[in-house]
Image: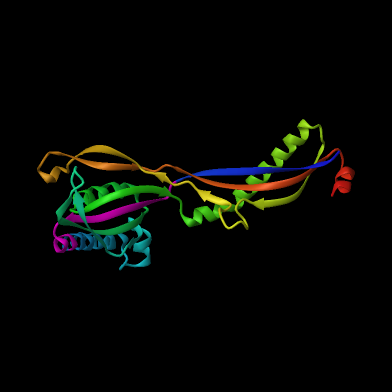
Amino acid sequence: MPFRISVRGTASISRMAERAIVSIKVSAQGPSQQQNFSGAVTSAKKLQDIFTKQSHSDGTQAEQDAAVIERWTMSSITTHSWYERNHKNEVSEEKIHRTNIDFELHVRDFDALGELAATLGDMEHVKIESVNWVLTKATIAAHKSELRKLAAADALQHAKDYAESFEMAVVKPIELVEDGAGDGGGQFFSQTLRRADMRQRAACAPSGGGSGQEVTHVVFRPEEIDMEGSVTGKFLVGNSEEDLSVKA
């Protein structure tokens, strides 16, 4: 006797990361609100100069396309004040102030990223919060069609496997829905963010430097990013096309 089955099909395609998203925080904290604010703003202005230069935002389109930094953004300035407590839970008479400014960079040149990280690491009030690997929108768009086909084929194969276990010879698709479609949450496509693996590399200083000392740079090794998609398929399963026609 024919019956209906519902199965989920999944697909995954891996490609090497093409961009690094760098999250940077500028933060100054202490008893002087004016000093903290001034210190954070000064460091933020230095970062703006560095990022503008390395993104060639004032240059030609060709220079921008070849720049280390594809684009960057800066958040608004936020401040926070509080009174600290000691181990006896007693409130301190001195008020503490903090000023924060966040930056996000999209970096295309991974070799230059290590040198940039070393520069930022030496700056006052500046901290690299995280580095994540991602793919470009163009790469994602180019593979979505393939993901859909693979996910649908996977769902069909699942249906055939179940049909075979019940000794049914015919499988007919009757409905296919992209997971997340129409339910207000989730989506067919997802991209797995991967945190950068930050490793140290020792290198000799340039011969003209005169110091002869070793300097260290962070080496960022890009990883493969998984693009994933999933669908839910409904199928009629029976012994013949006639059985399925009656069931439908």
Quadrant of the rendering where the N terminus is positioned:
top right
Instruction: Check the image and report above or below for 214 versus 21.
Output: above
The one of 36 and 238 positioned closer to us in this rendering: 36
Instruction: Check the image and report above or below for 188 versus 4.
Output: below
Name the residue at the left extreme.
210
Residue 110 drawn at (x, y percent): 34, 48
- On screen, residue 52 versus residue 145, left or right, reads left
Q: Is residue 138 magenta?
A: no
Residue at screen point 30% across, 41% down: 219
Residue 11 drawn at (x, y percent): 59, 43
Residue at screen point 61% across, 47% down: 230
- The quadrant in which residue 161 appears is top right
- The quadrant in which residue 224 appears is top left
Q: Tell me which segment is drawn in magenta.
A: 17-37
- On screen, residue 63 versus residue 13, left or right, reads left
Q: Is residue 19 magenta?
A: yes
Q: How many marks?
A: 0
- On screen, residue 124 versus residue 20, left or right, reads left
- On screen, residue 26 versus residue 140, left or right, reads left
Residue 31 drawn at (x, y percent): 14, 57
